[in-house]
Amino acid sequence: MGYNFYKGFEVDKLAKKKVKDKETKKTGLKKTKKLEPKKESFYADTLKGQRAIESIVRILKTTLDGSKKVKMALMGIKGIGYNLSVSICRIAKIDENKLLKELSKEEIEKIEDIVNNADKKLPGWILNRRKDYSTGETKHKYGPELTMQLREDVLRLRKIRAYRGIRHELGLPTRGQKTKNSFRKHGVVGVVKKKTNK
């Protein structure tokens, strides 16, 4: 009896199918064609780069996102919150919903001037350094000045051994919170049983 070519071909097909089924069972995923990522032209890349550069605005030695509204973008400067940014816009007579990149040089200079002379141009209650400990003046600090000031304040509290200073030293909360559940930064101990003497 001769070899049935068609029968043999069907057997081969079934064997290959079984192998494929095993592969998909192992991974649990269907085989899909790999899509090659679309290559963008050099021109498109340069345009993207230009747009990114255009949308960067530098105010008070800080790079800000120009695609945001003025009131939201100013919050990128450390020491300026939402209320202060809105009040700065209103004093400078700038539309707070305008995009930052749309501002003119004069408007940016106005904003910088208001922040630098905040003690004269803004009400005292909105500033972040009221009745300073050493000078007694009311000022507004921002950026690296603010971080330096905070560090100095903590160092002073630690030096005079105030309660708040000691809590800062230990890395614990300074405002009377409970520490049974929260502020657990260190390794977990759990329950340790006492050794019984036999």
Image (tube, grey):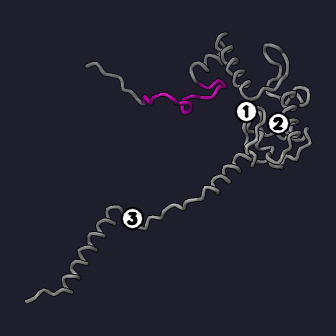
Label 2: element kind: helix
Q: Label for residue 29?
A: 3
Q: Which of the labelled discs sits on residue 11, or is there none?
A: none
At numbered mark 1, what does the secondary structure look like: helix, strand or loop? loop
Q: Secondary structure at mark 3?
A: loop
For the N terminus, give its image quadrant.
bottom left
Q: Residues within 10 Å of mark 2 (few under 14, many from 20)?
A: some
- Left/right placement of residue 150 relative to residue 31 reads right
Whichever of callouts 3 and 1 sits on the residue coming sooner in the sequence is 3
Identity of the residue drawn at 75% across and 49% down? 67
Q: CA distance from mark 2 to mark 3?
A: 54 Å
N-terminal of the pair, mark 2 or mark 1, is 1
Q: Is residue 120 above or below residue 162?
A: below
Q: Main secondary structure of the magenta part?
A: loop
Q: Which mark is residue 84?
A: 2
Three-letter amino acid code at the position of disc 3: Leu
Farthest residue to the bottom: give it. 1
x and y percentages locating residue 175 in the rendered image: 67, 25
Tell me which segment is drawn in magenta: 172-189
Q: CA distance from mark 3 to mark 1?
A: 48 Å
Which residue sits at x=37%, y=64%? 28
Dot 3 and dot 1 residues touching (CB under 8 Å):
no
Task: Give the amino acid at mark 2.
Answer: Leu
Camera-nearest label, 2 or 1: 1
- Which residue is the site of mark 1? 78
Q: Amino acid at mark 1?
A: Lys
Q: How many marks?
A: 3
